[in-house]
Amino acid sequence: MPQQLDDLIFDRTAADVQRVKTLTGKLSAGTATEEEKAEWLAGMKGAYNAADLNRVGAAAVYLTERLYALGYTVPAVPKTDWQEGSFPTASAMEQYIENIHLLRDCVPYAAPDAPGAAEKLTFQEANNIEEILHTLERVLLAMQEGFKLRQADTLFMIAGGVFNNAG
């Protein structure tokens, strides 16, 4: 899989979220150890921050471009420049969720449901967002392989058809 999809996270757990809450409390109280501070700074799976938003944005850009190359028009507007410490606007988060819906709904396949809204996003909904993108890539690869097989040994392919050079 391309780099944009290799780092997707869809195995967050309630324990990951609880660990973030625990460390947040310790950091606020000033009782966190150096190891806990390092853990916090390294990025935690149970948090959802700019790194997560940018990872999803990069995957959405990649998939939007990939779909376009395959003849699909997806009016997604992914954002990849979220900044740590800044708070996303409601409209930016609405667009973030809308991008996931647009990508999920462009080809028929079974995947988790996309969240209805970004407000009070649960860890499972965050998992679903990234699993949708990962699954969509697998579906696109299968479709492309299916196109190749369907046209194998036809006059079209022997003559240098469209998918002869597909990679």
Image (cartoon, rainbow, N blue to C red):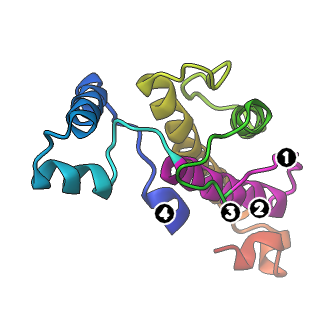
- How far is disc 4 from disc 2 in space, using C-alphas? 15 Å
Mark with earlier residue (4, 1): 4
Q: Amino acid at mark 3?
A: Lys
Image-based side of 117 in relation to 6, left or right: right
Q: Quadrant of residue 69?
A: bottom right
The answer to whether the residue labelled 4 contacts the one labelled 2, judged by CB atoms less than 8 Å apart, is no
Helix, strand or loop status at disc 4: loop
Q: Is residue 124 above or below residue 127?
A: above
Mark 2 = which residue? Answer: 65
Residue, far front = 30
Mark 3 = which residue? Answer: 148
The answer to whether the residue labelled 4 contacts the one labelled 1, judged by CB atoms less than 8 Å apart, is no
Q: Is residue 66 above or below residue 20?
A: below
Mark with earlier residue (3, 4): 4
The answer to whether the residue labelled 1 contacts the one labelled 3, judged by CB atoms less than 8 Å apart, is no
**Magenta part of the protein: which range?**
50-79
Mark 2 crowd level (few <14, some 14–19, many ≥20, 10 Å Cα): some
Mark 1 = which residue? Answer: 74
Q: Position of residue 11 (x, y in %)?
A: 34, 36
Mark 3 crowd level (few <14, some 14–19, many ≥20, 10 Å Cα): some
Which label sits in the foreground, 1 or 3? 1
Mark with earlier residue (2, 1): 2
Observer-nearest of 124 and 147:
124
Q: Amino acid at mark 1?
A: Val
Q: Amino acid at mark 2?
A: Glu
Mark 4 = which residue? Answer: 1
Mark 4 crowd level (few <14, some 14–19, many ≥20, 10 Å Cα): few
The answer to whether the residue labelled 3 contacts the one labelled 2, judged by CB atoms less than 8 Å apart, is no
Mark with earlier residue (1, 3): 1
Secondary structure mostly seen in the magenta stretch: helix
Q: Position of residue 118 (x, y in %)?
A: 63, 26
